[in-house]
Image (spheres, rainbow, N blue to C red):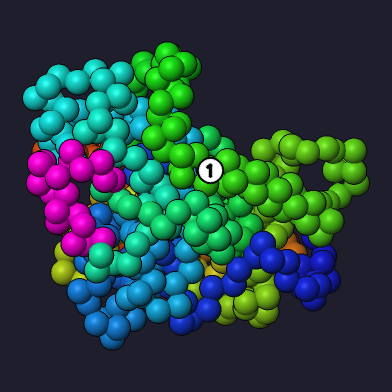
Amino acid sequence: MISVSNLCDDSPLPDLEHRLTADERLVFVHIPKTAGLTFRALLAKHFDVRQSYPRPDEWWWPHLGTSEELSRYRLFNGHYVYSIGEAVRNAVFVTMLRHPVDRLVSTYHYVARTPNAFQHDYVVSRALSLDEFLSDPVTVHAQANWAAGFVASIPAAQLKTHQQKMGHSEAWASGDSLFPNLGASVAAERLESFAMFGLCERFQDSAFMLDFVFGWKPATNYQSFNVAATGNRRADLAPRLVDAVLEANSVDVAMYERASALFEERFHRMCELLLERFGAASHAHMKQPLPPEVMVELLEKHYQQRCIESSPEPRGSFVWDVAGPVEGSGWHSAEAVGPGRHGRWTGPGTVSTLDLRLAPDHDYTVEFELIYAAARAHYRGVELYANGTKISLRHAVAIPGRPRRYRGVIPRRVVGERVGNFVTLEWRVAKTIDAQSIAPNREDARRVGVMFGGLRVTPRRARKGAGSERTSA
C-alpha cells in the first residue's frame, strides 16, 4: 500500500530525474532508423499537439523562425540535430541510439524502398545488394557516422551549406558524410548532458527510463511503427564486412559503446532508487534485472508521487481536451478532425485508460463523446470502468454527422478508495482494426478502436428527467 508520506517524500532529487519547467523545450534528436517513430509517439502524448513543432522531418526549418515564433512550442519531436539549440532556447535533449551495423542494415532497406530517401536513385539504379551498399565507397562515406552527426553536429549554418553541396551526386565522391560531426569526445560530452537517452536494442527499458526521468506514467500499451520485416541481420553479414562498417563508423561505434555502458549504469541506479522508495516486502529478495511487471508497479508509484508533488490537492472537476496531454495508456496521438477541432483514437489494444485525481466529496458525472468508431458495434458496446467498477452509461439518441455523447455516474466510494484519490477511467471495446481499412487511400499503420472528442467530469447534481437519453445495451 502506498502511503501519502511515501508519495510526498522530500528526499533530494537524483541526477537521473528532470522536472520540465514552463520555459524549457523538449527536443528529441531522432537519429534515423532507431525506432524513432515509436519513441515520438511516446513523447507526443505528454504534450498538447498544438504545442508540438509541426515540421518533424526538416532539421533546418526551426532555424528560419524567430524566437517569438518558436516559443509557442514545447516539443520538438523529430529529425533534429543538436544544433537546434542555437534557435530553440532552453532545450532539453533526449535521443535513441542503435548499434551502428544494425542501423546501417536498416538504412539500406529503407533507402531501397523509399523514393525520396537520400541516395535512393543511386542504390536502385545500380541494384546494390546489402553487401554492396556497405562496401561501395559512395554509400559508405556519405552514410557514415550519422548518429554522431546528429549528437555532435556542426553549427547549423555550416551543416546547411554542406548538405546543399551533398545534394549533388558528384559531391559523394568527396568522402564526406551527409552529417559531419565534431568528434568522439564532443559526442560523448553532449550525450552525457542529455536528460535521457535510450538504446533501440533495449526499447522497453528505454521507455521505462524515459518515464522515470520525467515522472510519467509507465508506457506499456503502445504500438511499434515503421518496423520492416527483413531477413538481414548483423549476424548474417560476413565478418570482414562487419569490420569494415565498424571502421568506417568509428565515431558512432565509440559513442554507442559509451552509451551502452552508461545506460546500464543509469538503469541499474534507477532500479535501486525505485526499490528504495517504493519496494515492498515481496520485492526484498529480487535482484536486477527486475521483471517487467515489477518495473511497471514501481514506476506507477513513482508517477503518482510526481503527480501529487506537482498538484498536491485533487480536483473538484476535470475537463480533458483530447488535443492536450494524456496521462494514461492505449491512446494514439491527437489529430485534427476539422477547423479548431481534434480527436484521439484508442489503440492499439482494446483497453484505454486515463488517470485523474478527484476530491472524494461527491459522486461525479462523467460525460464523453465519440467522433468515430472503427466498427459500428463499438458505439453501443463501449464500456467504461472507474477503478475497476463498471459504470452504467446512458447515451443520447444518435444524430447523423454528430459525435455520440455518453453519460455515467462515478460513485464517491470509488473516488476515495485509492491513496491520493487517483481514479483510473478505463474504456473497453471488443476489438481494434487497421486504420487503413477505414481510409484505404491513406497510409496508416495504426490499430484503432474509437475516436474520442472530449471528456468532462463534474460533481453530480440532481437532474430533472432523463430527456432523450437511454441506457447502453
The N terminus is located in which quarter?
bottom right
Q: Does residue 384 sit above or below 216 in this rendering?
A: above
Q: Residue at x 40, y 20 (%)?
A: 241
Residue 353: x %, y % from top left: 51, 52
Residue 9 seen in render? yes
Left or right: residue 263 compared with residue 395: right
Principal secondary structure, stretch drawn in magenta: helix
The residue where tag 1 is placed is 254
Residue 422: x %, y % from top left: 65, 64
Q: Does residue 393 sit above or below 139 in this rendering?
A: below
Left or right: residue 241 compared with residue 185: left
Q: Residue furthest bottom?
A: 68
Q: Does residue 85 sit above or below 438 in this rendering?
A: below
Q: Quadrant of residue 285?
A: top right
The C terminus is located in which quarter?
top left
Residue 215: x %, y % from top left: 61, 63
Q: Which residues are magenta?
A: 159-177
Front residue of 175/76: it is 175
Residue 470 seen in render? no
Label 1 packing within 10 angstroms: few (<14), some (14-19), many (20+): some
Front residue of 108/198: it is 108
